[in-house]
Image (cartoon, grey):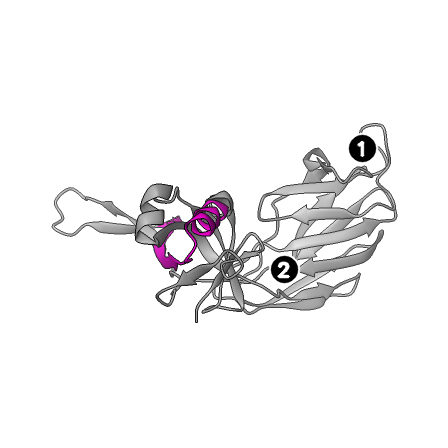
Amino acid sequence: MSYFIFNDVSSSDLGIIVTEPVIRPTWGKEFLEIETAGSAVKFMQEKSNYKNSEFVIKTAVSDDDPIEMRNKIRSIYSVLNGFGKLWLSDSPEEYLNVIIQPLVPETKAFVLAEIPIYVTCQPFAYAVSPTIIQFSTETVEVPNNGTVFSYPEIKFTPTADDVTITVNGVDFMIKDLSSVGEQSLIGKEITVDNENHVTYFVDENNLKWAINDHTFNDYPRLHTGINYIMHSGNATNAQINVKERYL
């Protein structure tokens, strides 16, 4: 029987029965139609972005005790709302970034014992267990086995002021790490979040602090197939998380 997990909470634990198999959506690039004077054919220009997709998870809830039934429904409504990560048992190696739309009124769900869950899904399914590779001053191959380019996450601990990370021959530089505000980040782990275009460190209170003003050049991305990475030195514990994603 199908089930799902939303933000680490299982539909089974909520007492939800998924009544139909759930098939995740797929994505394709958008195209812009352009009319050209004197031509009977519209020119199709490929856009760089991908549209969100929508689908419905059909579910039912059952309990012989009306009070328990109402409590169960209220628990469901407290969990299934807003933005989060969705894992589907029919696609066990992937997860989706989704928004769960407001559910039907509780009274209607109580009477019908059915709750359709309307999901808006951001582009791409992401690998549950992505590839993570250590790298150093020697060039290392980094395979991206997804079906579309990815924005990896890169972590390292600087041992000096400046670190240069080279991905597919292009440099991404992080400079002046000994003077970030009133502190030095030498010896502290740095994270380069290429998907969100932010470089940060985490302080002793587990708060993230962006240091984008210390970075130079475009954030790296990985094409499908084999990529290459290295750093110029002045770093230890360097690793790249490919964060494979799929159409």
Which residue position holds label 2?
A: 168
In the picture, measured across the screen, residue 33 lies left or right of residue 98, that is left
Find numbered disc 1 in the image and state the secondary structure of the residue it sits on.
loop
- Asked whether residue 62 is drawn in magenta, I would say yes
Q: Nearer the viewer, mark 2 or mark 1?
A: 1
Q: CA distance from mark 2 to mark 1?
A: 28 Å
Q: What residue range appears in magenta?
A: 47-75
In the displayed structure, 244 sits above or below 34; it is below
- Left or right side of 23 for 222: right
Indicate the quadrant containing the N terminus: top left, top right, bottom left or bottom right.
Answer: bottom left
Magenta span has 71?
yes
- Where does residue 5 sit, x and y in percent of width and height? 52, 58
Disc 2 or 1, which lies upstream in sequence?
2
Foreground: 154 or 99? 99
Q: Give the residue number, with chain letter if any, for mark 1.
A: 180
> Residue drawn at (39%, 64%), measured in percent from left and top?
22
> What's the residue type where badge 2 is placed?
Asn
Visible in this render: residue 4?
yes
Of the pair 96 and 227, the residue shown nearer to us: 96
**Quadrant of the image for the C terminus?**
bottom left
Left or right: 207 as drawn, with respect to 75: right
